[in-house]
Image (cartoon, rainbow, N blue to C red):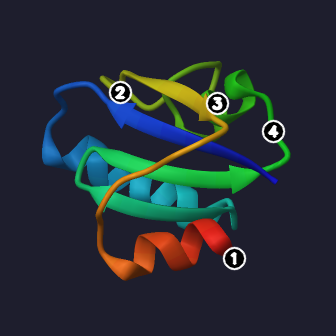
Amino acid sequence: MKIFVIVLDKQGESVKEAVNDRLKNKNVKFYRISSATFILKGEYLSGEVAEIVGIKGDDRLKDASGVVFRIDSYSGFADPSIWEFLGD
Protein backbone atom coordinates (compact mmCIF):
# COMPACT_ATOMS: atom_id res chain seq x y z
CA MET A 1 0.00 0.00 0.00
CA LYS A 2 1.30 3.48 -0.87
CA ILE A 3 1.89 6.08 1.85
CA PHE A 4 1.36 9.80 1.33
CA VAL A 5 2.02 12.81 3.52
CA ILE A 6 -0.26 15.81 3.03
CA VAL A 7 1.01 19.16 4.27
CA LEU A 8 -1.49 21.99 4.19
CA ASP A 9 -0.24 25.48 3.60
CA LYS A 10 -0.89 28.12 6.25
CA GLN A 11 -4.67 27.77 6.46
CA GLY A 12 -7.33 28.86 8.84
CA GLU A 13 -8.59 26.24 11.26
CA SER A 14 -11.85 25.93 9.27
CA VAL A 15 -9.95 24.66 6.19
CA LYS A 16 -7.96 22.16 8.28
CA GLU A 17 -11.16 20.83 9.85
CA ALA A 18 -12.85 20.69 6.43
CA VAL A 19 -9.96 18.54 5.13
CA ASN A 20 -10.20 16.30 8.20
CA ASP A 21 -13.98 15.90 7.71
CA ARG A 22 -13.54 15.28 3.99
CA LEU A 23 -11.08 12.44 4.65
CA LYS A 24 -13.50 10.87 7.13
CA ASN A 25 -16.35 11.13 4.64
CA LYS A 26 -14.30 9.64 1.78
CA ASN A 27 -13.63 6.57 3.94
CA VAL A 28 -9.87 6.56 3.32
CA LYS A 29 -7.20 5.37 5.75
CA PHE A 30 -5.58 8.45 7.26
CA TYR A 31 -3.83 9.63 10.38
CA ARG A 32 -3.75 13.25 11.47
CA ILE A 33 -0.26 14.12 12.74
CA SER A 34 -1.05 17.78 13.41
CA SER A 35 -3.73 20.26 12.44
CA ALA A 36 -2.07 20.74 9.03
CA THR A 37 -0.31 17.40 8.41
CA PHE A 38 -1.86 14.05 7.54
CA ILE A 39 -0.67 10.58 6.54
CA LEU A 40 -2.86 8.74 4.04
CA LYS A 41 -2.57 5.14 2.85
CA GLY A 42 -4.06 3.68 -0.30
CA GLU A 43 -3.56 2.73 -3.91
CA TYR A 44 -3.74 6.25 -5.34
CA LEU A 45 -1.66 8.62 -7.42
CA SER A 46 -0.45 11.81 -5.75
CA GLY A 47 -2.83 13.89 -7.87
CA GLU A 48 -5.76 11.72 -6.79
CA VAL A 49 -4.83 12.26 -3.15
CA ALA A 50 -4.72 16.02 -3.72
CA GLU A 51 -8.25 15.83 -5.14
CA ILE A 52 -9.50 13.61 -2.30
CA VAL A 53 -8.10 16.06 0.25
CA GLY A 54 -9.58 19.05 -1.58
CA ILE A 55 -6.44 20.99 -2.51
CA LYS A 56 -6.79 20.33 -6.25
CA GLY A 57 -9.47 19.74 -8.85
CA ASP A 58 -13.03 20.81 -9.57
CA ASP A 59 -14.14 19.97 -6.03
CA ARG A 60 -11.32 21.97 -4.38
CA LEU A 61 -12.08 23.44 -0.97
CA LYS A 62 -12.24 27.23 -0.98
CA ASP A 63 -8.90 28.72 0.16
CA ALA A 64 -7.30 25.28 0.56
CA SER A 65 -3.73 24.76 -0.58
CA GLY A 66 -0.96 22.33 0.23
CA VAL A 67 1.32 19.62 -1.10
CA VAL A 68 1.04 15.83 -1.32
CA PHE A 69 4.21 13.74 -1.02
CA ARG A 70 4.40 10.01 -1.73
CA ILE A 71 6.97 8.42 0.55
CA ASP A 72 8.65 5.04 0.44
CA SER A 73 10.67 5.14 3.65
CA TYR A 74 10.45 6.82 6.99
CA SER A 75 12.32 7.02 10.27
CA GLY A 76 12.12 8.91 13.52
CA PHE A 77 10.67 9.00 17.00
CA ALA A 78 6.94 9.59 17.33
CA ASP A 79 3.79 8.60 19.11
CA PRO A 80 3.35 4.79 18.95
CA SER A 81 0.00 5.23 17.21
CA ILE A 82 1.77 6.63 14.14
CA TRP A 83 3.91 3.48 13.87
CA GLU A 84 0.80 1.33 14.32
CA PHE A 85 -0.94 3.20 11.51
CA LEU A 86 2.06 2.87 9.20
CA GLY A 87 2.45 -0.84 9.99
CA ASP A 88 -1.27 -1.62 9.61
Give the alpha-carbon distance from disc 3 to disc 4, as whole Å: 11 Å
| Residue matched to label 1 | 88
Q: As drawn, is 65 to the left or to the right of 21?
A: left
Residue 85's spot in the image, x, y percent? 56, 73
Q: In which quadrant of the rendered image does the N terminus lie? A: bottom right
Q: Quadrant of residue 69?
A: top right
| Residue matched to label 3 | 51
Residue visible at 63% across and 19% down?
A: 57
| Residue matched to label 2 | 64
Residue 62's spot in the image, x, y percent? 37, 26
Q: Amino acid at mark 4?
A: Tyr
Question: Dot 3, how many residues are within 10 Å of its Cα: few (below 14), some (14-19), or many (20+)?
Answer: some
Helix, strand or loop under label 2: loop
* Nearest to N terminus: mark 2 or mark 1: 2
Single out the mark in the foreground, 2 or 1: 1
Q: As drawn, is 9 to the left or to the right of 52?
A: left
* Nearest to N terminus: mark 1 or mark 3: 3
Q: As drawn, is 52 to the left or to the right of 77?
A: right
Helix, strand or loop under label 1: loop
* Nearest to N terminus: mark 1 or mark 4: 4
| Residue matched to label 4 | 44
